[in-house]
Amino acid sequence: DKWADTPTAAPSITITTKDIDFGEPALNKNVYKVRITYTGGTSQACNIQYAKDGSGSFLEFDANLNYTTNTTQQIVDLTPSAAITNIKSIQLKISGTAATTFELNDISIIFRIKGVR
């Protein structure tokens, strides 16, 4: 087989992040939103899930990463279907069929550390 930099078919992908504790593993946090920035795509969809506190049990966001043909940078904001509160860490998983032109640029997590009372 000859190596080609551009895939010839839409690949099946699974991207799993490490367990993210935001540099404060002992403090509780509330996660409000996950923002994903990407380019490319041709009417494909990727499922985005999250796991809390290293459980490995992934839960759904309200929306999937549905993208259409584009060459400019796109932003999608994902809110959880249930509030993500009082967690120590979060892990993200992106899976599904990606277009050959799909490029994941950035993942941002909007969160707040809970104060000690």
Image (cartoon, rainbow, N blue to C red):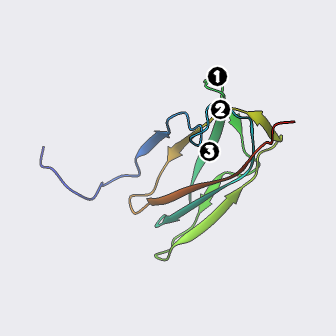
- What residue is drawn where x is 83% and y is 41%? 83
SS for callout 2: strand
Task: Mark 3 or mark 1: name the one nearer the start of the chain.
Answer: 3
The three-letter amino acid code for the residue at tag 1 is: Ser
Q: Which residue is mark 2?
A: 51
- What residue is drawn where x is 74% and y is 35%? 28
The three-letter amino acid code for the residue at tag 2 is: Ala
> In the displayed structure, does residue 69 sit left or right of residue 103?
right
> Mark on residue 35?
none
Quadrant where the image shows the N terminus: top left
> Mark on residue 48?
3
Vertical relation: 84 (above or below) 68: above
State the residue in front, 63 or 107: 107
Q: Position of residue 102 (x, y in %)?
A: 44, 60
* Residue 52: quadrant of the picture: top right
| Circle 2/circle 1 CB separation < 8 Å | yes
SS for callout 3: strand
Quadrant where the image shows the C terminus: top right
Q: Nearer the viewer, mark 2 or mark 3?
A: 2
- What residue is drawn where x is 41% and y is 52%? 10
> In this orientation, does residue 91 appear?
yes
| Circle 2/circle 3 CB separation < 8 Å | no
For the view shown, which residue lies furthest in the right direction? 117
- What residue is drawn where x is 77% and y is 46%? 80
Q: Nearer the viewer, mark 3 or mark 1?
A: 1
Q: Which residue is mark 1?
A: 55
SS for callout 1: loop
